[in-house]
Amino acid sequence: MSTKQPKKTLPPQHQNERPGLEYKMNPRPVFDREVQDKKLAGKTAIVTGGDSGIGRAVSVLFAKEGANVAIVYLSEHRDAEETKDYIEKAGGRVILIAGDLGDEAFSNEVVKKTKDAFGSIDILVNNAGEQHPQKSIEQITSHQLLRTFQTNIFAMFYLTKAVLPHLKKGSSIINTASVTAYKGHETLIDYSSTKGAVVTFTRSLSLSLIKQGIRVNGVAPGPIWTPLIPSTFTEKEVSEFGGDVPMERPGEPVELAPSYLFLASEDSSYMNGQMLHVNGGTILNG
């Protein structure tokens, strides 16, 4: 049994009745929370890869819930502008920041532009990623390996380091992993490896930052219909995409966005270092 003293100490007490009576407890358990019209009102979120796919759905939902959103993307300008227009037409505040997150210097630019536009940063969603299927490890070049790690995990380190001095107690960091981190993928060896790194990065960072009151969690999506799929898989693979999960279909980005909202808001105030598995019913350990 741990002897570590909890921060919130409870007065010594005992009840003879079992399973116990709540009205006799001191203090009484908190069982209700004020319902907020907008869960992220007054907050500012940075969402990488926010131009399309999962990041677009997250950006739209965050904006609807009152957050200012800084969308960071590589060069998909039309998708980014469409997302920006959609958010603004709904009354949201959003800026676009284009650049390569694999370049550490760019992270400082992201922070500066976000602070200049909105004044603060409360939420970081590390979501940008890339994949390049290969039939065998022999076909994974050193260039591809480095590029995949730069985008999928190095960029998370870079941007988190740049954002951290600006986060305050109550802030949240959310990292996008993948079902492949847990079950692997025969043609996505390097990609799966980076996503495994994202899981352990999330867990380790959560332990490092919790004393500052900053929570770190993640989402591990299953097969989701995003631009990554038609741009990296063959026509046959696309036609079969998502058919191997219990729900027998790919998921839509809109089906993931509420998980990110949950982790960004006070609804998940007692969660830290965890991964949410939104994957069409695939059962995983860890």
Image (tube, rainbow, N blue to C red):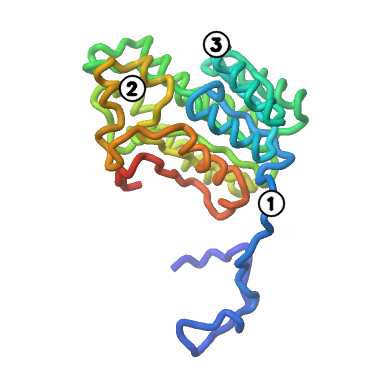
Disc 2 from disc 3: Cα separation = 23 Å
For mark 2, does the 10 Å Cα neighbourhood hold few (<14), some (14 to 19), or many (20 or more) residues?
A: many
User: Along the polypeptide, which appears first: circle 3 or circle 1?
Assistant: 1
Residue at the extreme front: 89
Q: Nearer the viewer, residue 29 or 76?
A: 76
Going from N to C along the chain, the mark reached first, 2 or 1, is 1
Q: Mark on residue 20? A: none
Judged left or right of residue 227, residue 38 is right
Residue at horizontal 58 percent and vertical 13 percent from the top: 99
Residue 88 place in picture, x, y as percent: 69, 25
Badge 1 density bin: few <14, some 14–19, many ≥20, Cα 10 Å = few
For mark 1, what is the residue?
36
Q: Amino acid at mark 2?
A: Asp
> What residue type is disc 1 on?
Gln
Pick whichever, 23 or 203, lies toward us.
23
**What residue is disc 2 on?**
190
Mark 2 in CB contact with mark 1 (< 8 angstroms): no
SS type, badge 1:
loop
Residue that appears at 40% across and 20% down: 228
